[in-house]
Every structure is written in C-alpha cells, then in structure tokens.
Image (spheres, rainbow, N blue to C red):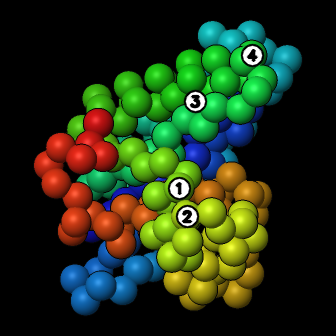
Amino acid sequence: MIILGIDPGLAIVGFGIIEKKLNGNICVIDYGVINTPKEENTAVRIAMVYDGITELIEKYKPDVIALEELFYNSNQKTVISVAEARGAILLAGIKNCGNMYEYTPLQIKQALTGQGRAEKQQVQYMVKLILNLTSIPRPDDAADALAVAICHSQTNNLVTKTSNRI
C-alpha cells in the first residue's frame, strides 16, 4: 500500500510518501515540501498547492492519503489561510485518489511514540527510526508529513470505514 502523508499549510505543504509492504515493513519512497511564494496573492498560492498535490498523486498513485487535521493556534489569519489551502488539498485528494483519512496531532504522536503529548523532536526521531533513515528528514514539514503517513500505516487496520475517513 502506498500512502501519501500531508502536513497542510499555505506557505509550506509537507509531503511524505511511504510504502507499507505485505510483511508490515515500511519504506520511504519520497518526501519534501511544496512551497508557495509569500509575494503571490492567496488565490494563486492555493492553486499552486492544488497543482502540487495533484502532481504528487499522478506521479506516485497512492492508495490512500493521510492528512493532518488543522490545529488551531491563536493567529486567526494563519488558521484561515491554512484552512483555505487545506480545502485545496482535500479537493485534489478526493478528485484524484478518493481514499482519504485525517488524524489529529494527538493521534499522530500517539501512533509514533506511544504518547499523545510527545515533543516534536521525539516524533521526528521515531520517523527516522521507523523508516531506517540516516538522519531526520528536513524540513520539519516533510518529517511531519512522513509521521502522518506512518500513523496511517500503523492504525489503518484498526480504522473502521467511517472513523477518520474523509
């Protein structure tokens, strides 16, 4: 099973693509970020996010997309723009893959570290360990996206047809 994990954002969208083999082993296929220039207007940046996700889906043909749920912080302007970009990600995913799940930051931390309140560094270390990488993936957004994909790979047998499914 090929899983595309996504850490949503407007300026930076992290992506991580992994494969879960029949024997349960997980290997990394690719990871990185989609960057949008802050000088562009929001509509153009949202279109860039949509196009970037669509290209990833066409290139890697994931069986499933796992997306981190929006985490609300105190900056309303940031949360609105990230929500708008997340809408473009959802649209690209549902139109081009159709099989999407979302996970809260707490669920992701729990799946990777066994503790829902784990620190970011602990999660990144587990991404490196689980994927047998020589270093923690950079930038952080890519590591976060790989964590989302790993979360799905470790919990998808437990996921019912309706829980966590978009």
Q: Residue at x 46, y 58 (%)?
A: 107
| Residue hosting label 2 | 116
Q: Which residue is mark 3?
A: 49
Q: Which residue is located at x 40 percent, y 30 percent?
A: 90
Task: State which quadrant residue 118 falls in.
Answer: bottom right
Q: Residues within 10 Å of mark 1 (few under 14, many from 20)?
A: few
Mark 3 / mark 1, whichever is N-terminal:
3
Q: Residue at x 71, y 32 (%)?
A: 73
Judge the density around disc 4: few (<14), some (14-19), many (≥20) Cα neighbours within 10 Å: few
Q: Which residue is mark 4?
A: 77
Question: Mark 1 or mark 4, which is nearer the start of the sequence?
Answer: 4
Q: Is residue 61 visible?
A: no
Give the quadrant of residue 139.
Answer: bottom right
Q: Decide: marks 1, 2 in contact (CB < 8 A)? A: yes
Q: Residue at the spot x=55%, y=71% of the render?
A: 115
Q: Are marks 3 and 4 in contact (CB under 8 Å)?
A: no
Amino acid at pointer 3: Val
Foreground tag (4 vs 1): 1
Q: Gap in Å between the C-alphas at discs 4 and 1?
A: 23 Å
Query: Three-letter amino acid code at disc 2?
Result: Gly
Which residue is tagged 1?
A: 106
Q: Are marks 3 and 2 in contact (CB under 8 Å)?
A: no
Is residue 132 positioned above or below 13 on the image?
Answer: below
Residue 24 in the image, given as x and y percentages of width and height? 30, 85
Label placed on residue 158:
none
Asked if one can make out residue 76 in the rendered structure from this viewpoint, the answer is: yes
Q: CA distance from mark 1 to mark 2?
A: 5 Å
Q: Mark 3 vs mark 2: give the one in front.
A: 2
Secondary structure beneath dot 3 equals: helix
State the separation of the CA atoms marked 2 and 4: 27 Å
Tell me residue 54's x, y (percent).
43, 35
Query: What amino acid is labelled 4 in the image?
Result: Lys
